[in-house]
């Protein structure tokens, strides 16, 4: 591992094997350069083309491109009328940006513990958390695994609750023949550089509801209406637009999505084969009745692990030049969540146990067999040395 120190104390850590890396070819570069050579850098034809392409891919009526998945989830909450005094049921095992958009809308996230196998929200525990204040359910397709998403939607439908499907990690996954992104009342994908496809930064809202789509289009563009002028604003809005530069990159990436999914499945298979006999680890597998578009590859330490033991392994792996991470810390135990809502250790035992044991290994489209072998060798060495 090489450390480079820059001005003002900023440190860049260079690893010999990175945790993630985007897959960019001449096609993406040309697509972006073509937009840069045009007069339409924002709100141009590539925006609509990208929205229509992803809506078609997921079988949705509308796509609304935004500047991040976080913004997309927030606009879903706003479009559904969620605000102060309301509650939204979600999972505490996720990236923080699944929960913060609920708070940004003024509502309260109500957490439901996870299933310890799928690592998704446990459908069997949802109904106990539904109250007169509940306004929506927000399930997360964690790590690209959509298991249980159909059951969450059935529960929400019984209680007349909309579903905000956080599929930011799940583009390309299929459950029981149905594409992720097509389950919820509204769905959101994210396009950060470590996702299945990237726009650099960006996200996409998908829905079949005309009114919800129109509201999101207005909200992302300073509250303008479709029919109003540039300086006419019918509601409080935001600048959450996605530029045509980003959209051009997204179109080129979307055209290669099936290639990406196959590459990622191959990397996952290499890890599964090389770690198959390692009895100190839980190695993720593709669930039944599902095509999983892998987002990351996260192994877990088996019984008798401790957080300090896991953290020691992560530090040792990084020292060996392998970038790994702890996906994810429990959302409910983040300092501002504890301060705001009074959550305590033990509130969600499945989540906390899983969070203490996870190690996200390097994972991207073009990770070579030699690199995967190196990662596995160094991981086993780290396990042997603690």
Image (cartoon, helix red, strand yellow):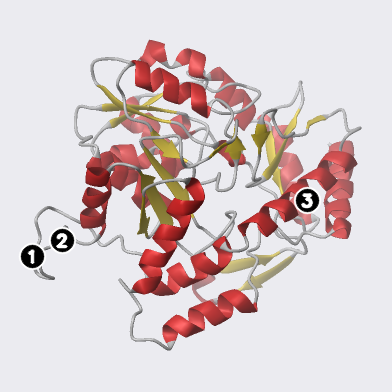
Which residue lies under the disc numbered 1? 232
How far from the left and from the top, in percent, is residue 62? Answer: 35, 50
Residue to which mark 2 is pinned: 224
Q: Earlier in the sequence, mark 1 or mark 3?
A: 1
**Could you say which quadrant of the image residue 292 lies in?**
top right
Up/down of 158 relative to 188, above or below:
above
Image spot of residue 102 (x, y percent)? 32, 37
Instruction: Check the image and report above or below for 323 versus 90.
Output: below
**Compared to 175, does 225 lie above or below?**
below
What residue is shown at x 54% (from left), y 23% (from top)? 114
Residue depth check, mark 2 versus mark 3: number of the one nearer the observer: 2
Q: Which residue is tagged 3?
A: 267
> Label 3 neighbourhood size at 10 Å, few (<14), some (14-19), many (20+)?
many
Horizontal placement of 137 versus 348: left or right?
A: left
Q: Quadrant of residue 97?
A: top left
Q: Is residue 233 left or right of residue 300?
A: left
Residue at the location (36% across, 65% down)? 48
Residue 81 in view of the camera: yes
How far from the left and from the top, in percent, is residue 124? 50, 13
**Element type at mark 2:** loop
Element type at mark 3: helix
Marks 2 and 1, how far apart at CA: 6 Å
Label 2 Cα neighbours within 10 Å, binned few <14 / some 14-19 / many ≥20: many
State the residue in front, 198 or 156.
Answer: 156
Residue contact between numbered discs 2 and 3, judged by CB atoms under 8 Å: no
Q: Say if residue 362 shows up in the picture.
A: no
């Amino acid at each position: 591992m090489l450390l480079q120190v820059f001005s003002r104390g900023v440190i860049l850590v260079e690893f010999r094997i990175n945790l993630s890396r985007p897959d960019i070819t001449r096609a993406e570069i040309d697509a972006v350069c073509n937009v840069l050579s045009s007069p339409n850098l924002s709100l141009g034809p590539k925006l609509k083309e990208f929205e229509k392409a992803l809506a078609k891919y997921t079988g949705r009526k509308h796509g609304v491109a935004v500047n991040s998945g976080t913004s997309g989830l927030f606009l879903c909450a706003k479009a559904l009328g969620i605000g102060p005094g309301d509650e939204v049921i979600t999972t505490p095992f996720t990236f923080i940006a699944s929960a913060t958009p609920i708070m940004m809308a003024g509502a309260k996230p109500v957490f439901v513990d996870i299933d310890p196998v799928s690592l998704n929200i446990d459908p069997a525990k949802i109904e106990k958390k539904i109250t007169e204040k509940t306004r929506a359910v927000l399930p997360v397709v964690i790590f690209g695994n959509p298991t249980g998403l159909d059951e969450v939607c059935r529960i929400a439908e019984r209680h007349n609750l909309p579903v905000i499907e956080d599929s930011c990690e799940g583009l390309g996954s299929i459950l029981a023949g149905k594409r992720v992104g097509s389950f919820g009342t509204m769905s959101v994908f994210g396009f950060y550089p470590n996702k299945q496809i990237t726009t650099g930064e960006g996200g996409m809202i998908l829905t079949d509801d005309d009114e919800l789509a129109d509201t999101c289009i207005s909200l992302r563009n300073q509250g303008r209406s479709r029919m109003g002028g540039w300086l006419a604003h019918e509601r409080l809005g935001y600048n959450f637009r996605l530029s045509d530069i980003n959209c051009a990159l997204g179109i080129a990436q979307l055209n290669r999505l099936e290639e990406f999914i196959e590459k990622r499945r191959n990397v996952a298979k290499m890890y599964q084969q090389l770690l198959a006999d390692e009895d100190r680890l839980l190695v993720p597998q593709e669930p039944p009745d599902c095509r999983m578009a892998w987002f990351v590859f996260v192994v877990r330490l088996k019984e008798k692990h401790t957080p300090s033991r896991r953290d020691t392994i992560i530090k040792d792996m990084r020292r060996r030049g392998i970038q790994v991470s702890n996906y994810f810390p429990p959302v409910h135990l983040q300092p501002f969540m504890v301060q705001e809502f009074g959550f305590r250790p033990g509130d969600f035992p499945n989540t906390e146990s899983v969070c203490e044991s996870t190690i996200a290994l390097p994972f991207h489209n073009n990770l070579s067999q030699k690199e995967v072998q190196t990662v596995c060798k160094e991981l086993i060495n780290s396990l042997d040395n603690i």
